[in-house]
Image: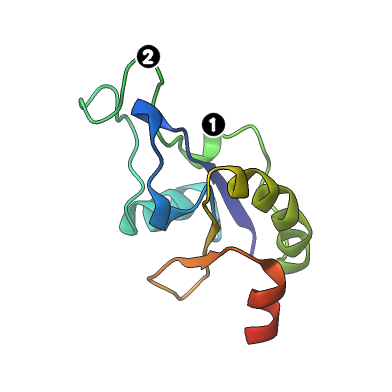
């Protein structure tokens, strides 16, 4: 099953730390990924709803509007995470993954630590 990418914008100058700098959601398609992402706290249309800063823009973008295509496998995900972690560390954040069948985000700060647990 593919992993869909959600990039968190620091709307209002801050991030939601428990979500990760970026969030990968494993789902069958974009619509399912959006529903699953929303189930763990991702929201869309934050500016229109008065939650996000209009000058920074919406914190989250639905999967179909993300510029990065979904990753087709866990192997591709594990190859992509080091680049995401590099950026996340500068904000003292991790990378979030919502695996199929899970209802909680797995937050990774070091890929090596995560791989040792698996």
Residue marked by disc 2: 55
Horizontal and vertical percent position of residue 23:
52, 52
- In the picture as drawn, the residue positioned furthest to the top comes out as 55
Task: Name the element at disc 1.
Answer: helix
Q: On residue 1, which mark appears?
A: none
Task: Look at 33% across and 42% down and name the residue there.
Answer: 43
Asked whether 72 or 58 is in front, the reply is: 58
Up-down relation of residue 7 to residue 118 (above or below): above
Horizontal and vertical percent position of residue 19:
42, 54
- In the picture as drawn, the residue positioned furthest to the bottom comes out as 117
Task: Look at 29% across and 23% down and name the residue there.
Answer: 47
Asked whether 49 or 30 is in front, the reply is: 49
Left or right: residue 35 compared with residue 98: left
Task: Look at 78% across and 67% down and name the residue there.
Answer: 75
Q: For the residues marked 1 and 2, what is the alpha-carbon distance in whole angstroms?
A: 19 Å
Left or right: residue 13 compared with residue 46: right
Asked whether 104 or 117 is in front, the reply is: 117
Task: Look at 66% across and 53% down and name the residue there.
Answer: 85
Up-down relation of residue 54 to residue 30 (above or below): above
Question: Looking at the figure, which quarter contains the N terminus?
Answer: bottom right
Q: Is residue 31 visible?
A: yes
Question: Looking at the figure, which quarter contains the C terminus?
Answer: bottom right
Residue marked by disc 1: 65
Q: Are marks 1 and 2 in contact (CB under 8 Å)?
A: no
């Amino acid at each position: 099953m593919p992993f869909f990418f959600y990039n968190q914008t620091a709307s209002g100058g801050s991030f939601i730390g428990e979500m990760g700098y970026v969030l990968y959601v494993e789902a069958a398609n974009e619509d399912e990924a959006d529903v699953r992402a929303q189930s763990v706290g991702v929201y869309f249309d934050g500016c229109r709803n008065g939650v996000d800063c209009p000058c920074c823009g919406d914190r989250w973008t639905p999967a179909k509007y993300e510029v990065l295509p979904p990753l087709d496998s866990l192997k591709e995900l594990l190859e992509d995470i080091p680049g995401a972690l590099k950026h996340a560390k500068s904000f003292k954040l991790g990378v979030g993954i919502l695996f199929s069948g899970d209802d909680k985000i797995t937050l990774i700060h070091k890929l090596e630590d995560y791989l040792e647990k698996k």
